Image (spheres, rainbow, N blue to C red):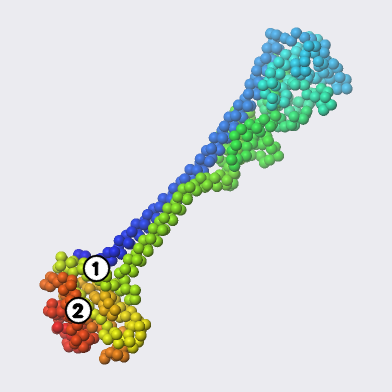
Amino acid sequence: MASLASTRFASRDSTGRMRMLVLVAAIILVTGGLLSGVYRFAQNLKTEYRGTSEAGAFIAATLDHELDLRRQYLETLADEASELLSGRYTLNLDITRYLQPGPEKQGYQLARLPGFGPADQGLLTGSGAIPQTGSPEAHEMSMAMGLTPMFRALKRRDVHLPWVYYRSENDFVYVYPPPETPDGEARFYHVQDLAARTYAHAGPAANPTRTTVWSAVYDDAVGKGKIVTVSKPLYDHGRFMGVLNVDLALQTLVNTLKVRHIRHATESLVGKESGINLLQPDSAVLPASILAAPRGQPVGSGDTRYLVYPLKSANWSLVLEVDHRAMLWQAFRATLLLVGAIIASLACVVLLLLLVRAMRDMQEMSIRDGLTGLFNRRHFDEIAQREVAHSQRNGQWLGMAILDIDHFKKYNDFYGHQGGDDALQQVAGALRNAVRRATDGVFRVGGEEFAVLVQLNDPQHLASLMAQICEAVRVLVIPHEKSSWGKVTISLGATLIGPDNPLPLDTAYREADEALYEAKTAGRNRYMLSPAAARYAPALEPGEGTQHE
């Protein structure tokens, strides 16, 4: 059964439901937006590191290619040297005839061979006495000289090769191209000049497996800057002969590291075992736990992450030192579009909430009396029409009362309009307190005129309820000098709509208004019931304000 409250608040309920829907949508949007933002941020961070990892893998592959190219040079040189040492073909020239002693240098040096141009011959220097013609040492020198065409081809092919040379166990060195001193003279190499850098670490004691090895970074003796050397030991029938070497300028490695720009990362080459940075030997040693990390996977904590790529062609690892804070910021910037969309959506939701609230306020203002806060005449007409129709459909008893304040014009004239407004507000409050059930409603339908609608389970209760309303105003004891009662009172007329009295709205209103007129005629400060309502009223003791027809 529909109640008076449900019809009274029908318009408000629609606004409330809309506000609830908007609120639920806002909660879903905020929650979904936050979860989406966090997920997108994590994905963007993974994407940033994935891009960095791929760039690092590309640089490592390029670096491996460059280093492997030098290793292949050495393998080819070693194969050619073995052919020369085996005697399959030899240099048809007695080199010992062109070796010139240098007593002050405690050794010898190869002069310019006949028919050889500046680019056809390297520098050969040795320690001790000049080898004899046909000796093993002379044969080894012929082998070294026989490698000159390949040395020259490597130099032409790779302009970044400072030197290609052979260091013999028999205390001589053959270097191509021939280095010169600042005064233009050919430089004389002592054995010890190259032993520490390239010979010792590739010889039998340090390299028993006879593999290709790379040196640490060192300063070139002739001013070529920082270089590294890849060395290959040479054996003849199991006897150690010497070491073939190819130098590589450090700047070449640096340029290789810069082949692809990686944002927020610093590239370095680190020894796999030592943890020493080849490019910056004085920097802190990298812990073994970082060097042992999975290839290309970020490791570390704090503001720094490391990505490690072990190289195949050398005992080094490419290490990317990544600024983790910058990566976080980059991932956040990539998420800003989604964040902006979420903020814009929230702004729309807030505006929608404000609009719903404004609509609710406007609806409330359209059905409320601004002075008393009661429902107004417009809302009374709407609600009364619905309630009368509901009563006729469902056989529900409905009471309707019309009342006004006695001698209100005199009150206004004596106490002023402000006093009249105060009295109206107090009377409205008393009516609201007297009719406080959810199925009842109080309306201000005119200046000092009010209306009451009540749903009744028993029609006999109408009279007692009207008596309570009159008494609720009396107990306010609002002074009224121009009233015979000395205080503000009301006159009230009521009628009854129900199964035995199915009145239309205009008829019911007229009956209640006629009952009000009779209450005023009878002396005011009382209620009167219409004939239809009086049939159900219980017998009451005569007294002030309790009369009824």
* Residue 334 at x, y percent in the picture: 51, 45
State the quadrant of the C terminus.
Answer: bottom left
Q: Name above or below for residue 91 compared with residue 524.
A: above
The disc placed on residue 513 is 2
* Residue 257 at x, y percent in the picture: 63, 33
Q: Quadrant of residue 448?
A: bottom left
In the foreground, 514 or 534: 514
Residue drawn at (41%, 55%), measured in percent from left and top?
348
Q: Name above or below for residue 71 compared with residue 226.
A: above
* Residue 83 at x, y percent in the picture: 68, 12
Sequence order check, earlier mark of 1 and 2: 1
Whether residue 9 can be seen here: yes
| Secondary structure found at label 2 | helix
The number of numbered discs placed on residues in the rendered structure image is: 2
Q: Which residue is mark 1?
A: 382
In the foreground, 498 or 539: 498
